[in-house]
Image (spheres, rainbow, N blue to C red):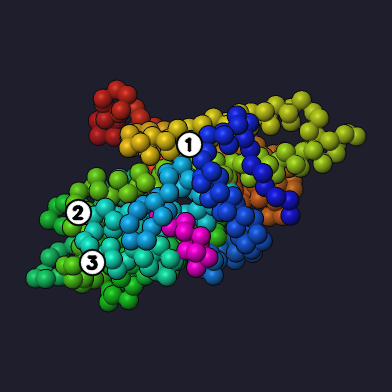
Amino acid sequence: MSVFRGIDYFELEREFTDEERIIRDTVREFVEKEFLPIVVDHYRKGTFPVEIIPRLGELGVFGACYSGYGLPGISNVAYGLIMQELERGDSGLRSFASVQGALVMYPILEYGTEEQKERWIPLLASGKAIGCFGLTEPDHGSDPGGMKTRAVRDGSEFVITGTKMWITNGSIADVAVVWAKCDGEVRGFLVEKGTPGFEARDIKSKLSMRASVTSELIFDEVRIPEENALPGAVGLKAALRCLTQARYGIAWGSVGAAMACFEEALSYAKERVQFGRPIASFQLTQAKLADMVTEITKAQLVCLHLGRLKDAGRLTHQQVSLAKRNNVRMALQIARTARGILGANGITDEYCVMRHMCNLETVDTYEGTYEIHTLVIGRDLTGFDALTS
């Protein structure tokens, strides 16, 4: 197996700190040596390699950009590079880490009590506990404000009833961050595995994100103590702030998927001989490769500046929407182009492009579709909300 060197057409390597390079290279080596040799088998079976979770905990990838409770507090650029390398392996791998850190650890750190933080953060950071994030519902994907899941206070308890859909890590999670309407207002709760009335069912019919656990969560009058409510998680904006954290990681991760597809297409084009010479020597192929590296470079520049803005505390959710919208659609187009360069070979899992292409079809629509992020940016530019008008 050749060592992945990455694509750095604009010498962005010089812009990273020594720590950021070391972190990226460490995760890159893990993906190369420990994940890529097993991912195809798991993709075929439709399973996630749970045996690597402790190793991910050892590497410190879960919630790595946060501080306190034993967390490393690395830069957001370094964290982005982790997401890039994980998704170069597979979107399912990055999604697992992204949910664990951005959608479970973040709301506990941001909205939880000291007792909740002390109990869950060390376990989640080490991979000894797994979390999931329950917001999306069967009838309310792009419109989470229309959720039907309800939480009703009953003395010192809350009773939760409803259903969540397309939940990454759902059936293997020890704790779920669940959003429900309570007295007409969205609130966040911690629901632990094994709580009576709480069930997680895996979705088996996926043709995308196959090396990932995706579940339906069912709450049938699930009773939880009031200390399981996240006191600061009040209002839909609280849930959306969690999504901003995750979308930031997706913007970086999709670049990793694009890099993997480009690298494979370039290598294949140099070796594949047609009409007496490598297809890389033909103008049409070179034009495709030039377009691919251009779009990847633009996305890398977006990610780097986005990370510096986040580290400086100046990041807005609209900027994250722009990056997620652009970078994922870019990666999807590159995966499709790479598949075309590989021809018939591109549809086999001997190569990575079809796997990435199928995964990116999901990444393009989850945590805000391309169209929703278009309207987020449009509202920011014009002041008019097209979603409600």
Give amino acid for label 3: Glu
Q: Mark 1 or mark 2, which has the lower sequence index?
A: 2
Query: Crowding near pointer 1: few (<14 within 10 Å), some, many (20+)?
Result: many
Q: Is label 2 or label 3 in front?
A: 3
The residue drawn where x is 42% and y is 35% is 308
Tell me, yes or no, if residue 59 can be seen here.
Answer: yes
- Tag on residue 41? none
The residue sitting at 85% across, 39% down in the picture is 273
The residue lying furthest to the right in this view is: 276
Dot 3 or dot 1: first in sequence order is: 3
What secondary structure is marked by label 2?
strand
| Element marked by disc 3 | helix
Q: Check residue 232 in the rendering and tell me which mark sits there, or answer none.
A: 2
Kind of element beneath mark 1: helix
Q: CA distance from mark 2 to mark 3?
A: 14 Å
Q: Please indicate whether residue 150 sits to the left or right of residue 121 in the image.
A: left
Q: Nearer the viewer, mark 3 or mark 1?
A: 3
Q: What residue appears at the point 64 percent right and 48 percent down from the top-left corner? A: 354
Name the quadrant containing residue 38: bottom right
As rendered, which of 340 and 292 lies closer to the eye? 292
The relative height of residue 73 versus residue 70 in the rendered view (above or below) is above
Q: Nearer the viewer, residue 103 or 169?
A: 103
Q: CA distance from mark 1 to mark 2?
A: 30 Å
| Image mark for residue 303 | 1
Q: Name the side, left or right, on which 347 lies relative to 50.
A: right
Q: Could you tell me the amino acid type at mark 2?
A: Gly
| Residue 146 in picture, x, y percent from top left | 25, 48
Q: Quadrant of residue 275?
A: top right
Q: Which residue is mark 3?
A: 115
Range drawn in magenta: 54-63
The percent coordinates of residue 368 (x first, y second) are: 39, 43
